[in-house]
Image: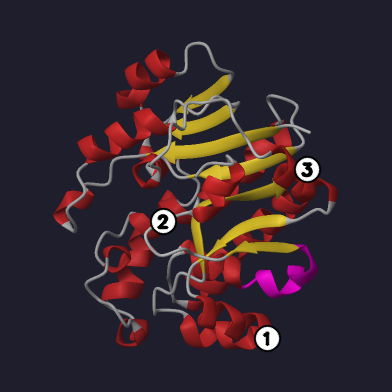
């Protein structure tokens, strides 16, 4: 039983839309990179020094690319059209949200499904399990994430029972679409975080399957139907089909990403 983490970081000038600068993300990224597990990284050349400094003694596969090489980056202009000109703009509940103003954001965050697929297909470190981790996830952690300490019993359970390990975001809304899958269509445009997409994963075959379907849904359910939203609503299309495989961690007030604390057996 072994696992690979996949992450990515690209500059999208989000400080124009919220208070998070790219320099701040680079600081968070440098801490996330200290996690001592095999890691696949998709990023820009400007982050090479950080990666080579922090990851020099840890198994790492890095793809230094331009933004044009991001799997769904070619949809940026279509996303802009959908948000600003199409009839769908009238269904957007939070027009000032980042995803509805920074038109690169939606194509990039939904590209994580393709990056996960590629990492699983190539399996650079010959691992059994794969987990997505956001580049800036370290900002939520109050323990020393560089320690080589993981919850063996939990990880063995995820592996043995073929679970998809997820952190609940909005519990009521999540239960709503799990019980009535067709209602996902009512949520698109509302930026609902059914699950927290910063850390999640499981066995390679089931994660490949859900990522493959989610990547297809980005085109077939979003772009081709002139509607858009975050990646949490895309993966929510598929969650009801995996009910027996879902392992959810409920949120705890004041502790973001409880599922990562549990994964590391941290307090």
141 vs 41, left or right, is left
The residue shown at (56%, 30%) is 40
How much space separates mark 1 and mark 3, taking CA atoms? 28 Å
Which residue carries the number 3 mark?
Answer: 156
For label 3, count other residues whose C-alpha is less than 10 Å away and answer few (under 14), some (14-19) or many (20+): few
Q: Earlier in the sequence, mark 1 or mark 3?
A: 3
Outermost residue, front side: 267
Q: Main secondary structure of the magenta part?
A: helix
For label 1, count other residues whose C-alpha is less than 10 Å away and answer few (under 14), some (14-19) or many (20+): few
- Contact? badges 1 and 2 (CB < 8 Å): no
- Contact? badges 1 and 3 (CB < 8 Å): no
For label 2, count other residues whose C-alpha is less than 10 Å away and answer few (under 14), some (14-19) or many (20+): few
Q: Which numbered disc, 1 or 2, marks the residue closer to the eye?
A: 2
Question: Can residue 115 be seen by looking at this rendering?
Answer: no
In reply to whether residue 238 is colored magenta, the answer given is: yes
The residue shown at (54%, 84%) is 185
Q: Earlier in the sequence, mark 1 or mark 2?
A: 1
The residue shown at (77%, 36%) is 128
How much space separates mark 1 and mark 2, taking CA atoms? 27 Å
Residue 255, numbered label: 2
Circle 3 sits in a helix, a strand or a loop, which is it?
A: helix
How much space separates mark 3 and mark 2, taking CA atoms? 24 Å
Magenta-tinted stretch = 237-245
Task: Tell me if residue 140 comes above or below residue 190 in the rendering.
Answer: above
Which residue carries the number 1 mark?
Answer: 179
* Horizontal and vertical percent position of residue 187: 47, 83
* Horizontal and vertical percent position of residue 84: 26, 75
Circle 2 sits in a helix, a strand or a loop, which is it?
A: loop
The residue shown at (47%, 18%) is 55
* Horizontal and vertical percent position of residue 9: 38, 38
């Amino acid at each position: 039983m072994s696992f690979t983490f996949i992450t990515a970081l690209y500059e999208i000038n989000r400080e124009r839309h919220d208070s998070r600068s790219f320099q701040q993300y680079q600081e968070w990224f440098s801490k996330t990179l200290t996690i001592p597990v095999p890691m696949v990284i998709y990023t820009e050349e400007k982050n090479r020094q950080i990666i080579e400094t922090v990851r020099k003694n840890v198994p790492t596969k890095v793809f230094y690319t331009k933004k044009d090489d991001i799997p769904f980056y070619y949809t940026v202009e279509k996303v802009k059209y959908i948000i600003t000109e199409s009839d769908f703009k009238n269904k957007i509940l939070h027009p000032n949200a980042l995803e509805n103003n920074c038109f690169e954001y939606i194509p990039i965050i939904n590209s994580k499904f393709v990056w996960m697929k590629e990492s699983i297909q190539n399996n650079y470190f010959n691992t059994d399990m794969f987990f997505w981790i956001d580049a800036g996830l370290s900002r939520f952690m109050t323990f020393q994430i560089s320690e080589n300490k993981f919850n063996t019993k939990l990880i063995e359970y995820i592996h043995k029972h073929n679970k998809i390990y997820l952190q609940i975001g909005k519990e009521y809304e999540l239960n709503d679409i799990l019980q009535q899958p067709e209602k996902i269509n009512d949520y698109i445009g509302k930026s609902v975080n059914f699950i927290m997409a910063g850390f999640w994963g499981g066995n390679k075959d089931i994660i490949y399957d859900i990522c493959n379907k989610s990547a297809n849904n980005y085109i077939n359910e979003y772009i081709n139907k002139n509607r858009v939203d975050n990646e949490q609503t895309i993966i929510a299309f598929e969650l009801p089909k995996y009910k027996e495989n879902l392992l959810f961690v409920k949120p705890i007030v004041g502790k973001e990403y409880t599922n990562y604390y549990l994964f590391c057996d941290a307090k």
